[in-house]
Image (cartoon, grey):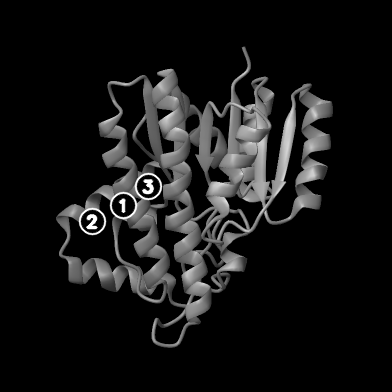
Amino acid sequence: MKNTALITGASNGIGLELARVHASKGGDLVLVARNKSKLDEIKAELEKQFNVAVYTIGKDLSASNAAQEIYEETNKQTIQIDYLINNAGFGDFGMFAETNWNKELQMINLNITTLTLFTKLYLQDMIKRGSGKIMNVASTAAFQSGPTMAVYFATKAYVLSFTEAVSNEVSDKGITITALCPGATESGFQSAGGLDESELFKGKKLPTAKQVADYGYKSMIKGKTVAIHGIMNYIMANSVRFIPRALVLKVSRKMLDKV
């Protein structure tokens, strides 16, 4: 029996690589992103290479009703979602007093509201069936505050906290929920967020989106609740609990400042 995975933000980066991993296992897909034409190209690639069925939905997931509309569409198409992968998200760089509120509102809607509603809608169906897997893509940013990326870091802290809590709630219902926490990744995120010149990214050899996707997918299948990619990221994410918060803020600011 094929498992069908719904993946948001599937047109590039980690989301695209997660789609490839799932298809390589013989699983069908529902791919969601704004760029429908790019998704259709991916659909053709995956269906030809792996002999799976791929359904594409072009949707701006920062719209408040996007998750509900997609849920209704998959129901209308009688597509059962066995794995939900909330990957879509974006960040922005700048002093909070100077950044664009409309962009931040879109970020909050996408990184928090849409992810939360997707989880609620598909989780209810999974509970009825007694099976299912959900992966929410957080970040190592979830473990600390981020001056010059205040809203982004805060949204990822929400994703981590939310995922851990709901994972506990359904631990006896045959369902697992995983928070994937990548560090800096070669995925196009830094360009979109204006971070190419920051100390965190500039001149660094970063893990590829494929490496992160492979790790995340395996962690989801195993039912791991929190999956931090990379040993150094794991050490840094956990060490902040033992370091004064003022010092953590200073280090975080230094890593995000442009060099």
On screen, residue 256 above or below 68: below
Rendering quarter of residue 127:
top left
**Number of numbered labels in the structure image:** 3
> The residue under label 3 is which amino acid type?
Met
Q: Residues within 10 Å of mark 1 (few under 14, many from 20)?
A: few
Q: Amino acid at mark 1?
A: Met
Q: Secondary structure at mark 3?
A: helix
Q: Is residue 3 above or below residue 178?
A: above
Mark 2 = which residue? 240
User: Which is more N-terminal, label 2 or label 3?
Assistant: 3
Image position, residue 177 (x, y; %): 38, 33
Residue that label 3 marks: 232
Q: Quadrant of residue 81?
A: top right
Residue 99 image position (x, y, % from top left): 47, 83
Is residue 169 visible in the rendered structure shown here? yes
Residue at image mark 1 = 236
Q: Nearer the viewer, residue 70 or 20?
A: 70
- Disc 1, disc 2: CB below 8 Å? yes
